[in-house]
Image (tube, grey):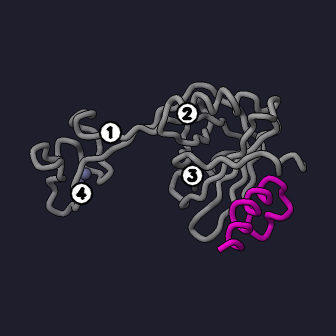
Amino acid sequence: MSTHSSIPWFDDFMGVAYRYYDLRMNVVPLLTDRKQSASLWHDTIHWWVDPSIKIRFVEIGDKYWFILGSDSQKPDTNLSFFKVLHKSENYERFKKGHGGEAYLRLGVYAKKTLGDVKKSALCNCSHEARDHDEGDNDVCLYNSCDCKKFASFQVNLLKRKKTITDILYLEEKDVKDDPLAWNCLNKNKYSKSEQN
Ligand SMILES: [Zn+2]
Ligand SMILES: [Zn+2]
């Protein structure tokens, strides 16, 4: 258990997607760069020992801490992941639906502009690409909409996966009893706020 404390914390990713894929819920840390995702997998996650992979969710108000870590067959390049995120519909769906098991996959998050997509693609404002004016800086043509520029995104799930069977939801007051969550908050929350 004490080995957790020496593993570096990694938070240089955009967020986490929760998707049904392969008949199971998938937990998908999102990266913007394909090369970065490939080397993260190759150097770190590939070496994780599946039964030791842990996800901890620590809910604090309308946010939550996503914490992911594992024992590794290659401890020198091991990392633990964390990110403070807003609770979302997909997060709540995962919480209700995972049933104690999930696949871990990496995802590459690609931002799409008006030129990249079909006319029927949805903008983040919920209106289609064809409703955005290509001549006028991509503004949405709906009068009621204040979208100034078409923007959409696509998540590409990478094929390689690991199985997670150790998933826990914690309240902050219970974090002390969980070595991985405690190490994360101690290092990335409590010791930081003391410095300020
Ligand atoms: Zn729009
Ligand atoms: Zn719109």
Mark 4, residue position: 147
- Indicate the quadrant where residue 190 lies: bottom right
Whether the magenta-drawn stretch holds residue 56 is answered as no
Task: Answer above or below: position of 185 versus 173.
Answer: above
Front residue of this view, candidates 71 and 20: 71
1 sits to left or right of 89: right
The label nearer to you, 4 versus 2, is: 2
- 4 vs 3, front mark: 4
On whether ligand 1 comes within 8 Å of the CB at mark 4, the answer is yes
Earlier residue among tags 4 and 1: 1
- Circle 2 sits on which residue? 36
**Circle 3 or circle 2, nearest the eye:** 2
The local crowd at label 4, few if under 14, some if 14 to 19, many if 20 or more residues have their Cα within 10 Å, is some
Question: Which comes sooner in the sequence, label 1 or label 3?
Answer: 3
Q: Which residue shows up at 21% across the image and 36% down it? A: 119
Asked if 144 appears above or below 159 in the picture, the reply is: below
